[in-house]
Image (spheres, rainbow, N blue to C red):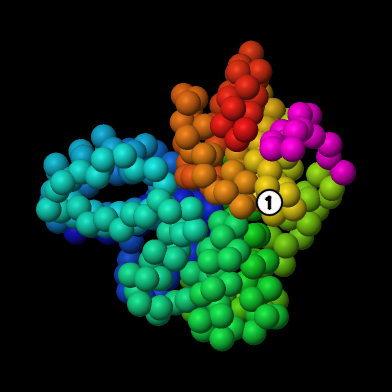
Amino acid sequence: MTIYDIFNGDADGICALLQLRHTTPCQSELITGIKRDIKLLEKVNAVQDDTINVLDVSLDKNRSDLLRNLKNGAEVFYVDHHFCGDIPDNKKLTTLIDTQPDTCTSLLINQHLQDKQPLWAITGAFGDNLNVSAQTLANKHQLKQSDMTLLKSLGIYINYNGYGASIDDLHFAPDELFKKFLPYQNPLDAIQDSNSVYQELKSGYEEDNLHVSNLKAEYKTDKVALFILPDETWARRISGVYSNELVNQFPDRAHAVLTQNSNNGYLISVRAPLNNKTGADELCRQFESGGGRKAAAGVNHLPKSELQIFIDKFVLQFK
């Protein structure tokens, strides 16, 4: 029998799996990738009595491979907060899916585990830019403000590491990063350990963030703002976290950050207004490689010839 742990390579996916494996340790086959690599179930060919845990990847984007593995006899535990479409009715499938904009996979796993690893859940929620939800859980566990600030930074840095066009763009492959944090039951211990990867992630983030400190919008109204980054490694790494920073600074405005790529197009991160966290997934699903959740979504490739089409739909979505 094989256990497969399939997880998004961002903070939410990694922190969700850390909670699960700290609570129920086992040997498993890790399947993940860059944050945008979400069709992960296609990499699994399970057989009878295998177990598959899927964390923080869209069921809708993995539907055919989910059905294939269920047909082969695998037991599947699916936890997510992205648009899912119709959930298959199968006795071997257990789901914990909530698409409300104020939750994430780390928080759902925390509920499932009955608060056994809340600090990693808080870290994952901060990484997903769910600051109010993270603070609510932190206050429930009477976390000091200073510790809350540290966990927020850790979540941002882990999330930052997941962005790129390929694994080569990242500081650490997500499965490697998971393994590096696995020895730490408490994420604050990882932050305080000078031998952990925390300082390397922090340094990388701060260096890349300098590039966007004075970036001007290519298109801006009271309702939306669109920024374009160059085809550079630093830009691919910072794009998602930069999108979060923008929406935190301007909570009544929707944001799109477009990063030029080598295929004569753009990779896009979209954030709905922080004060009305809906519509990002609806916008992005109008494009072939688009998807995500209500508050945050993206398009993996937009041809440059379709830029004006995207801008028009962006403006219409958040008018």
228 to the left or right of 92: right
Q: Which quarter shows the C terminus? A: top right
Asked whether 219 falls inside the magenta stretch, the response is yes
Which secondary structure class fits the magenta region best?
Answer: loop
Q: Position of residue 42 (x, y in %)?
A: 33, 38
9 to the left or right of 262: left
Residue range (magenta): 214-226
Residue 219 placement: quadrant: top right
188 to the left or right of 220: left
Q: Position of residue 28 (x, y in %)?
A: 33, 61
Q: Is residue 177 above or below residue 84?
A: below
Q: Is residue 29 visible?
A: no
The residue wearing badge 1 is 251
Residue 318 placement: quadrant: top right
Q: Residue at x 59, y 27 (%)?
A: 316
Q: Position of residue 137 (x, y in %)?
A: 51, 75
Q: Residue at x 59, y 43 (%)?
A: 272
Residue toward you, 319 or 56: 319
Under tag 1, what secondary structure? loop
Q: Residue furthest right?
A: 214
